[in-house]
Amino acid sequence: MELQALPSRIGQVRRIVSAQLRYWHLDPLIDPAALAVTELLTNVHRHAEPDKQCTVEIVLMLDRLTVSVRDHDPRLPCVPECDPMATRGRGLALVASVSQSWGMHARDDGSGKVVWFTLAVPQPAAPAKPPLAAHGAGRTAPPDRTDLSRPAPPAGVRERAPAARSAVSH
């Protein structure tokens, strides 16, 4: 998504990122992703020249989520040594502390830079293996017929399920 890195927009992007992660069922990643993207956008707001225009990209791979922020300023940020009591200058340290990895690079065409971070995607617990079917190894029994008022279909013919009905009354 493209945006101006203004304080009002930063909150909107944080909510959009959170909603996308909820949609992907990655709720454990919402807090670290929202914090890190807020820090990257705040850096664009405070430091990027000549403008505050940027692009946020979220990419989900099998084992990781990558969030990147691209702006038009080719100057790479520096990570200063910070006083733990400082109220500014700790954004990239926060990004490093909540992410699996992070980095930055100037764009090849000289039109700006990209700062990114990755988060490990939680792996679901392995599902329990179903017990072997009673009717032979690797086979399952055919479904029970519950509607005995109609004759069974001929062999090889599948019955169609009844059409779904709307719960809204007319």
Image: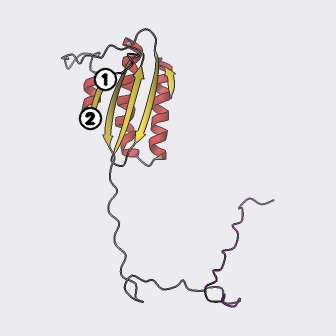
Quadrant of res 64: top left
Whether 111 is among the magenta residues is no
Magenta span has 169? Answer: yes
Residue 160 is labelled as: none
Front one among 107 and 150: 107
Secondary structure category for the residue under label 2: strand
Q: Marks 2 and 1, how far apart in space?
A: 14 Å
User: Viewer-nearest of labels 2 and 1?
Assistant: 1
Q: Which residue: 32% across, 60% down?
A: 125
Q: Are marks 2 and 1 in contact (CB under 8 Å)?
A: no
Q: Secondary structure at mark 1?
A: strand
Q: Quadrant of residue 110?
A: top left
| View extreme (front): residue | 109
Q: Which residues are magenta?
A: 147-170
Q: Is residue 85 above or below residue 131?
A: above
Along the viewing direction, whichever of 16 and 48 lies nearer the viewer: 48
| 39 relative to 19 in the view: left or right | left
> Which label number is shown at residue 101?
2
Question: Which residue type does callout 2 highlight?
Answer: Ser
Tell me what residue is drawn at x 36 percent, y 49 percent: 62
- In this rendering, the answer to whether 118 lies above or below 105 is below
Give 103 or 16, whichever is nearer the viewer: 103
Crowd class of label 2 (few under 14; some 14 to 19; many from 20; radius 10 Å):
some
Q: Which residue is mark 1?
A: 105
Name the residue type under label 1.
His
- Give the residue at x 46% y 14%: 52
Give the image location of residue 101, x and y in percent. Answer: 26, 35
User: Looking at the picture, how far across and down is residue 91, in whole percent?
Assistant: 30, 22
